[in-house]
Amino acid sequence: MTSQFVPTVTNMVTIVRNIIQGYRMGPIRALAQEPVQNSKDAARGQVKVEYRLHDRRSADGSGGYMLTVTDWNTSGLDGPVLSFEDIQQRGNVLGRDDNWAAFEGMGYTKEDESALGSRGQGKAAFLYHSRLPLVDSFSQERMMILYDTFLPDGTYRLGVRYANPFDTVQSPPYAGEHARSTVSYCYVSTDGTQIELGLVPLTTVGTRIIVPHLSQEAVDAIRSGELHQWLQRCWWRAVQTGLSIDIVDEQGVAKPVTVPRWWEAEPWETPGPGVKVYNEIDVADDLQIKRIVLLYDGTLDEPDIDDAPQQFHGVQLLRGQQWIETLGSELSDYVPRDKRPGFRGFVEFDRRTDRVLRRAENSQHEGFDRRVSGVKALISAIEARVEEFSRAQGWTTQEITRPSPGAERTVALEFLRFLSPDARRNSENGTASSSSAQLEMDLTEADRWKCDLRLDFPDPDSPRVDWGQHLRNVEVEVNLEPQRSEQAAVFLELAYPADKSTVVPVENQDLRLRDGVGVAHFSEFQIITDRPGVSKLCCPKSGKYRLSARVEFHGVQVARSSRTFYVKEDAPRQSSNPYTVSISVENHTTPQRRINSGDTVGVQVSVSNRTPQAQALELTASFGDLLLADTLSVQADGTSPGASPVRVAGVQTQVTVNPAATTTRRSVNLPPGKHDLRADLYLDGEVVAHASHTVHVEVDPAQPDDWPPFRIEQITGRGHHPRWQFQKKSEDDWTLQYPPAYPLYRALDSIPSRSGSRLSGVSAFVVDVCAEGIIEWAMEPLDAGNSSRLDELLNGAPDGADLERWEDYREKMWEIAGLRRGQEQVDKYGQLVRECAALSLSLFEERG
């Protein structure tokens, strides 16, 4: 029977990106974690896994590198080859031994198996790193993996999965001699794609995954040792008990994954100085911690992998001999800063607790949901033992904090209040907003103006424009609510942000709105280097430009929109969450953060889609026991190249907390204390973003006001302190600390704190610290896809700020957000943070 590609219903490229970009520790951890997990799940003895890099470049430079990941002493991809019709007849539920069908499927549940880990994480980890050359200039990104397996009964198969971008699998797979011949030489797809394999067919029971045209990111991770580091962090305990993992480079040199030297001798068996072991700790809900091992060795110097959450520095939580996450910042109160490099620990649980934790584990296997019953109790029990260990070591924090001196604090608060969203101009109508602005759109009778600048780039997927090319179909749609007919003026302006946002008028039109809608058509503009003219934009240098549209009504600006484009250079590569969710909560009864019984709060949950394609997402949101949205369908338009992401409201409502009597509005009964309003965003059944907002009911929050979002303190003590740091006690209790012993601070100590409107001396130092701190505060929730703080910070413009330069600040902030989790762009991230902080300072100093 002739093999052919059989399409599935999914856009595999999009799904793979969503899955792997959901790993807050990056795609290399996914590549280290998922393949080995799949091999362990299929174990038939002591499993051996080999990652091998193959050089498949031709003399003419074509081809590339190929990765194979092979396991032995496993069951292989056994089970029958099932068609999609066969699986549908089974209700999309596979048997325990239907491993071939499960690997070729996506999202099928297996009998007696948690759905966690059965949604394609392993396949995605491979596909993500396959970067096939494009067929032509019109084709989209393509991915491919091949997989062969040798079964105990002698069966030999070769399968192919191809995403171009839609998901296809070859059916039926190659078998027997046809499979061996293809593996030995090359594979040729129906579209002409040729993959030089040149591998030896498997002769031992097991499975091999073949990743052709391996991404440069993965090649670099193998050569630099980063992949080896992640494999050791994820699997050292399993290696210690028999798992074997090797990485083999293109020269055939093998490097085994070993146990870290501090755990190599199993010091928990005969604890010596600096080691403490706690065994069989019973916790609530019949859960049990099997073992906590804590160690301090001042000679340890192996660093964690940069730009990723803590790995070895802290207490590792292991589930089924696999590292899931590390308790680090939670333990900072017990482990002094100068002791943290030498502090190590790990925790193992009994089998029942392992099963509970598996259900609490996120789909990326890199964190536990603290909301699941028992998880908080387990972590509290661990923290208590760390505190006991700290006391036994004779540690103290050795740090003293105190409020910042009055003059420094005054100017810092002045700067932070300049950025305060409470004092903003409304971004939609250009008028000052009330301090108790209503979140429900129908609660205000004020005019609401919106405009949308639309245009077509030469490449529909990129905002790059070369000299001589055109921006086509330029138009501005203007909307007014309540709907009525009015006359407005639309102005187009060109700004070059690198030159302090110098603005050049382009064209303007009078626009007649009918029933609240009007469109101003500006046709097209050619990008040139010399003098501007009719339908020509002068962009003399390569770099970033911004075309802005602003709408005036009776001479007052009421709306604006902009698009960024890049002349003769590519736009910055971004790697953040493609989807985010944000939550706004506002007390409509009083201006306080504290919510008293009977108070009514406005709630808005919004969704942003940063991909260019429109996407149907599902939103679930809850406030206590009150379900605000249950898999609510939200149609999120894509973000056009050069445009900022647009928020789409999913939930807009009012909720009365602990009403004294029956109310016509939604209501919720909550006991005094802290409660979270939560939202999860789903795509194809997978959580792609999560957000939460803490609400204080009948109790005072640690910080009574919404703004500034953190306190400011000085910190002194032994050991090195960075220029600034956050002390984070909870999601809504942050303190920004800076050391007066810092060399630059000491050097500026005698310089006057203010010089006219300009900052200088220690005041400039402290405000600069706050400028960087506010960026970190806004970006931190983005690791989970929560853009609430960033949306809040960037909504509207501060009073007196230059609007073009504020737009530049907004764009830089979104660019920083795009690089937040980019392992390969750490330097670029830091550079942008410094540029953005400096821009906010100049906006503050030059405010009108």
Image: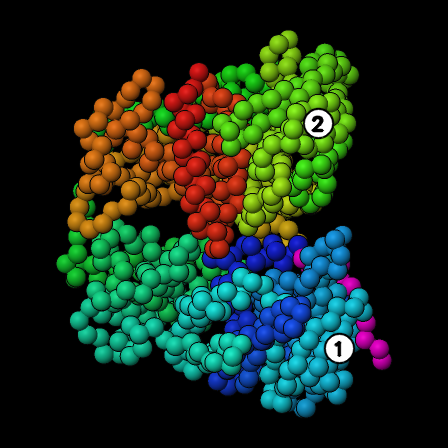
> Mark 1 belongs to which amino acid?
Pro
Residue reaching furthest to the top: 554
Q: Which residues are magenta?
A: 1-13
Q: For the point 54% across and 54% down, which residue is it? A: 22
User: Residue 611, percent across and down?
Assistant: 64, 45
Q: Main secondary structure of the magenta part?
A: strand
Task: Judge whether 749 appears above or below 568 on screen.
Answer: above
Vertical placement of residue 572 versus 530, above or below: below
| Residue bearing mark 2 | 536
Residue 2 shown in magenta: yes
Q: Nearer the viewer, residue 206 or 497?
A: 497
Residue 534's spot in the image, x, y percent? Answer: 73, 22
Q: CA distance from mark 2 to mark 1?
A: 57 Å
Dot 1 crowding, Cα within 10 Å, few <14, some 14–19, many 20+: many
Q: Of the numbered discs in the image, which one, if any, rests on residue 173?
A: 1
Residue placed most toward the observer, 429 or 809:
809
Q: Quadrant of the C terminus?
A: top left
Q: Which mark is residue 332?
A: none
Residue at 63% across, 20% down? 505
